[in-house]
Amino acid sequence: MKVTAEERFWSKVEKTATCWLWTAYKNANGYGRFNSGGRHGRIVFAHRWAYEQRFGAIPEGLALDHLCRVRHCVNPEHLEPVTSRTNTMRGETIAARHATKTHCDNGHEYTPENTRISTGGRRCCRACVREFNRARRARKAAAR
C-alpha cells in the first residue's frame, strides 16, 4: 500500500493545544524540512507545505510569518503571508530593535530634521555627527 505525501507529512506532526509541532528533520535555523515527493521528491519547508495544502499558493513576493513565533510550528492558522520587511520587523532581530528606536544612543530624538539616512541605509543622528566633527576639528587644531 502506497503512503501519500499527506499521510507522511501528518505522521511527523505533534498537535498541541496551540501549535502543531514538526517532529522530523529541522534545519540549523529550526525550520522543519519535508520531502514532498518521497524518494525522488522535492525538499520543502514543512510550514510552507502545510500552508499551501490549506490555503493554496503563497502570493508571489511574500514570506510566511509565524505569528506564534515557533519556527517548527506547521499550523496554517499560525502563518501569515507578509512582505520580507514586515516579517523582519515583527521579529526579535537587531534590525527590528534598531528600527523601533525613537532616540539615538546619546539621547537625541530621531526626527526628520535630526535624522540623516546613510548610503548604507542606516539612520544617523545629525546632532551626534555635528558633535563628532566639532571634536575632530578641535583635535586636529590642537595637534598643529
Image: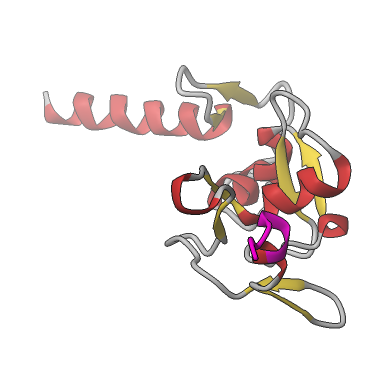
- Note whether 137 is above or below 48 in the view shown: above
> From this viewpoint, which residue is outermost toward the left?
144
> From this viewpoint, which residue is outermost toward the top?
119
- Note whether 28 is above or below 86 in the view shown: below
Residue lying at 53% horizontally and 64% vertically, measured from the top left = 30
Nearest the eye: 9 or 14: 9
Residue lying at 48% horizontally and 26% vertically, measured from the top left = 130
- The image quadrant of residue 127 is top right
Residue 62: % across, % down:
72, 31
Nearest the eye: 55 or 96: 55
For the N terminus, the image quarter is: bottom right
Nearest the eye: 23 or 97: 23
- Note whether 13 is above or below 2 in the view shown: below
Residue 72: % across, % down:
63, 66
Residue 21: % across, % down:
69, 73
- The image quadrant of residue 117 is top right
Q: Is residue 70 visible?
A: yes
> From this viewpoint, which residue is outermost toward the bottom?
17
Q: Is residue 105 visible?
A: no
Nearest the eye: 139 or 22: 22
Q: Is residue 140 left or right of residue 111?
A: left
Residue 37: % across, % down:
56, 47
Residue lying at 46% horizontally and 17% vertically, measured from the top left = 119
For the C terminus, the image quarter is: top left
In the rendered image, residue 138 lying in the magenta stretch gets the answer no
Q: Is residue 59 left or right of residue 106?
A: right
Residue lying at 19% horizontally and 30% vertically, measured from the top left = 142
Colour convention: secondary structure
What are the residue bounds of the magenta stretch? 1-7
Badge count: 0
